[in-house]
Image (spheres, rainbow, N blue to C red):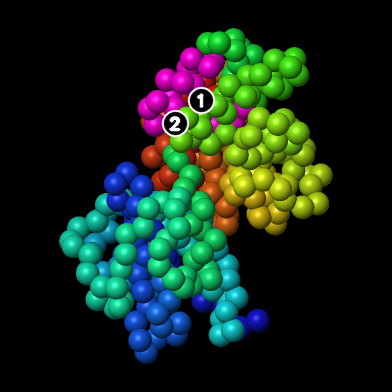
């Protein structure tokens, strides 16, 4: 293994996170012509955030005013073992200029970049950029199937773009019918649906993926064959297992006490932040969350929030 190089990498976002910036490495540098997320090496004594601010002033001529810690990726190049700490940046001062790059390009999140080649360490995070701030979990057992479908339809006509069908206590035929209706109304609005812990049902209704419980996660020997696979996690070991299986994202909680378990002690924000600090997967905070908690969650390294009653 070569030397370890610590790098701060910037995901600059605009249009509400619908577009992000890629920059092209100039002639004369290693991997000239490749496209990457801007950023660079940490200098001695620097934190990753300090390096991020300095590098973007040097490379793009901007001063960062809002940066959220995100995922950490490790990649071994022939010359070094690179540890990249990614930050999502939504506010800056100044106009972006390619001071140390050959060019830059704004790319739509969730679509093929349209530029090539990408640095290998940067490619795998593109899928994570397609994830929204909110992940809604259904509650048809409590609210009733028709009421939950009506709530979903209203939410999908708004901004909801990612749904998990839970409700495993429903009779199988009722859950299957409910899941099919959720998939149909979600797909009509461009939203994705994952089915909780039932591969056969996910395939039957044409869902976009599978959400594994922590129990199922522990028993997996390989990633299930779906475009999107996520898992519920409650510990560092479970987050590590989800990453080892190359899942797309995880849900970690409970962070705060919930209405169903008001006396149960949650992880708390400090513990949540410590657990996701080095995660290579996007992680949603779950448990006691409300939609307006998405920004506090992001400030602590989360992708966003998972919501059951609050969406």
In the rendered structure, does residue 158 fall within the stretch colored magenta?
Answer: yes
Badge 1: residue crowd in 10 Å (few <14, some 14–19, many ≥20): some
**Which residue is at 64% across, 50% downward?**
247
- Residue at the bottom extreme, as displayed: 28
Q: Which quadrant of the structure image shows residue 31?
A: bottom left
Marker disc for residue 84: none
Is mark 2 in CB contact (under 8 Å) with mark 1? yes
List x then y, in percent, for residue 166.
65, 26
Residue 256 visible in the snapshot: no
List x then y, in percent, for residue 5.
51, 76
Above or below: residue 227 compared with residue 56: above
Residue 199 visible in the snapshot: yes
Q: Horizontally, is 96 left or right of 112 in the view?
A: left
Marker disc for residue 185: 1
Q: Horizontally, is 218 left or right of 279 in the view?
A: right
Closer to us: 89 or 110: 110
- Residue at the left extreme, as displayed: 94
Above or below: residue 279 compared with residue 30: above
Tell me where the magenta segment starts and ends, as one range. 148-165
**Which residue is at 57% across, 34% downward?**
193
Q: Which quadrant of the structure image shows residue 278?
A: bottom right
List x then y, in percent, for residue 114.
40, 63
**Residue indicated by mark 2:** 189
**Which residue is at 70% across, 57% downward?**
244
Q: Quick one: quadrant of the N terminus?
A: bottom right
Badge 2: residue crowd in 10 Å (few <14, some 14–19, many ≥20): some
Q: Which quadrant of the structure image shows residue 148?
A: top right
């Amino acid at each position: 293994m070569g030397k370890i190089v610590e790098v701060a990498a910037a995901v600059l976002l605009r249009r509400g996170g619908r577009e992000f910036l890629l920059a092209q490495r100039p002639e004369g540098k290693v991997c000239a012509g490749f496209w990457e997320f801007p950023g660079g090496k940490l200098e001695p004594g620097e934190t990753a955030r300090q390096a991020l601010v300095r590098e973007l002033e040097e490379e793009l001529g901007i001063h960062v005013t809002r940066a959220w810690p995100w995922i950490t990726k490790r990649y071994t190049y022939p010359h070094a073992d690179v540890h990249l700490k990614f930050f999502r940046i939504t506010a800056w001062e100044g106009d972006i200029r390619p001071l140390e790059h050959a060019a830059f390009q704004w790319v739509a999140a969730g679509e093929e970049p349209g530029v090539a080649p990408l640095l290998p360490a940067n490619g795998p995070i593109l899928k994570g950029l397609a994830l929204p701030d909110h992940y809604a979990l259904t509650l048809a057992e409590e609210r009733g199937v028709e009421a939950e479908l009506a709530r979903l339809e209203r939410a999908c006509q708004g901004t909801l773009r990612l749904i998990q069908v839970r409700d495993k206590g429903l009779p199988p035929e009722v859950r299957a019918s409910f899941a099919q209706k959720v998939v149909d109304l979600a797909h009509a609005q461009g939203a994705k649906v994952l089915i909780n812990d039932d591969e056969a049902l996910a395939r039957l209704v044409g869902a976009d993926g599978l959400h594994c419980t922590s129990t199922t996660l522990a028993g997996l020997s390989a990633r299930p064959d779906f475009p999107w696979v996520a898992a519920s996690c409650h510990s560092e070991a479970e987050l590590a297992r989800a990453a080892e299986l190359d899942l797309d994202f995880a849900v970690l909680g409970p962070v705060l006490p919930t209405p169903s378990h008001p006396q149960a002690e949650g992880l708390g924000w400090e513990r949540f932040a410590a657990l996701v600090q080095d995660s290579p997967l996007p992680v949603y905070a779950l448990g006691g969350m409300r939609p307006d908690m998405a920004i506090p969650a992001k400030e602590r390294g989360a992708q966003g929030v998972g919501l059951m009653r609050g969406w």
